[in-house]
Image (cartoon, helix red, strand yellow):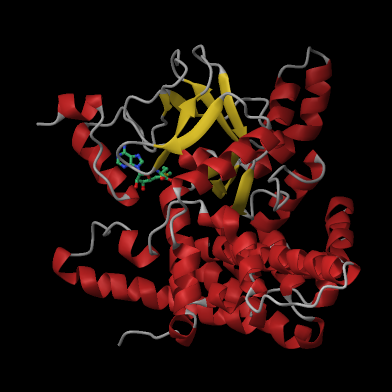
Amino acid sequence: MEVVCPIDAQFAEQIAVLLEPPSSLQLQEYFDELITSKQCNGIQVKPTNDYGKGVYADMEFEEEDLILKDQMLFGVQHSSNKIDCLVCSFCFRFIGSIELQIGRKLYLQGLGSPKDCFDLASEDQLENFHCLLLSIALGDVKKLTTVANLVHMLIGTYAILYFVLEKGQKSLSKKALSRFIEHANETNDIFLLAAKAISSTILKYRKLKAAHNKEKEKNHIAEVLGNHNFSLLLKAWKPLSMGYKRRWWDCIALPDDVDACDEAAFRMQIRQLAFESLELLKDAIIDEECLPLFSLEIYGHIIGMFELNNLDLVVASPVEDYFLYIDDLPEPEKKEVDEITQPFLDALGEDYSVCCQGTAFFALQSCMNHSCCPTAKAFKRDEDRDGQATILASRPIKKGEEITISYIDEELPFEERQALLADYGFRCKCLKCIQEQP
Ligand SMILES: C[S@@+](CC[C@H](N)C(=O)[O-])C[C@H]1O[C@@H](n2cnc3c(N)ncnc32)[C@H](O)[C@@H]1O
């Protein structure tokens, strides 16, 4: 049976306005301002002839030149990666000393399945988190059992959602929040990212409203615009309004193991899953002044936007550098240090160093279209130790040329490339594809 979200019908008009694609002028203004504020002066975002907006070179680039370093708007570490890497949930840099990273991983390896550790923390535990982390570093075994339940907690997601909770309903909402996060861990961690997007929009809305009220008081202005709350919500939503979107259950590619005749049932199931997640999120952080954000239509479009635009988030671990550094030490120093570190390396095993992995949405990089013979590449360099997207020129680029990247491995055969691009909802018609088409 098709699930129904009453908010969709109640706020149909506002939802349509929130999802209306921005005009060319709005796009231009928003991205020009963003590019100036981020000082990414070599690029321009503007409409393409064929497929929405794109990024264009505003200066000449040589091969390997840095075109853009883009700070993510929203990012999340994969739940399964949390056992290996302790990172900041906002910038995704590794947290703490090398000893902490190694000690934590060895300890958690000993505990077994990370799923066992997904119990969520109480408020006190949350507040004590940093002190408990310290106890791992110091090897305080008494506290470690509590820590076991904490380390897999999605601190960043939890924290930002937690801010949205109203004081009076905290105890009720915290349990609801745990249920939401647990469901996302068990089903799809993209829900955590959607929750981050919604909660940061609510926080921005509240900030705008407070500033608006202050201004009103200062100028002794009586409120005449009954609809001002919605215009503030629209303003808070603006960064999200700029991303290319479709509903998640409409744009997701049909998995290989689902028959074409079962497509409608598959899409219905995905919609149902999103509905279940949204109901849990509503229980936790609903905000009466931002109700349209809790419609299934908006939730589906936010997730769809992440599916169509996100870049893998990869941050190299400093643990690898640590062992490489030791390996490079001159003798006899190396032998001496090896005696101490080798047992740790052996205990860690082959996966002694794992990158932080997740998924993130970047405001500028997400405007780049795909080509199988791209002009640029999203690349991680040794010096990139955070979750920013780094875009380098793959060949010389002239001013005015489109900056394209490959969403997939462009060395794959034609049909495999097209199959992978189905996830993004299009077949590629670049020069290489036209030439290789059978
Ligand atoms: C990451 S966005 C790129 C920016 C997008 N054009 C926009 O308007 O925001 C990805 C979406 O752009 C479109 N797109 C990107 N490259 C394309 C290509 N080579 N051919 C057709 N559509 C493309 C597809 O709709 C895809 O889902």
Q: Tell me if residue 281 comes above or below residue 247 in the rendering.
A: below
Q: Nearer the viewer, residue 229 or 408?
A: 229
Quadrant location of residue 116?
A: bottom right
Q: Tell me if residue 293 comes above or below residue 331 in the rendering.
A: below
In the image: residue 108, left or right of residue 49: right
State how many labels appear.
0
Q: Regarding ligand 1, which quadrant of the image does it lie in?
A: top left
Q: Nearer the viewer, residue 71 or 148?
A: 71
Q: Tell me if residue 400 comes above or below residue 414 in the rendering.
A: above
Residue, far left: 438
In the image: residue 425, left or right of residue 25: left
In the image: residue 21, left or right of residue 433: right
**x, y percent for residue 221:** 82, 73
Q: Nearer the viewer, residue 348 or 74?
A: 74
**x, y percent for residue 86:** 71, 50
Which residue is located at x 77 percent, y 83 percent? Answer: 170
Residue 187 in sight from this viewpoint? no
**x, y percent for residue 365:** 52, 38
Residue 41 in sight from this viewpoint? yes
* Placement of the C terminus among the 4 image quadrants: top left
Quadrant location of residue 428?
A: top left
Which residue is located at x 63 percent, y 70 percent? Answer: 118
Which residue is located at x 30 percent, y 88 percent? Answer: 1
**x, y percent for residue 184:** 53, 69
Quadrant location of residue 114?
A: bottom right
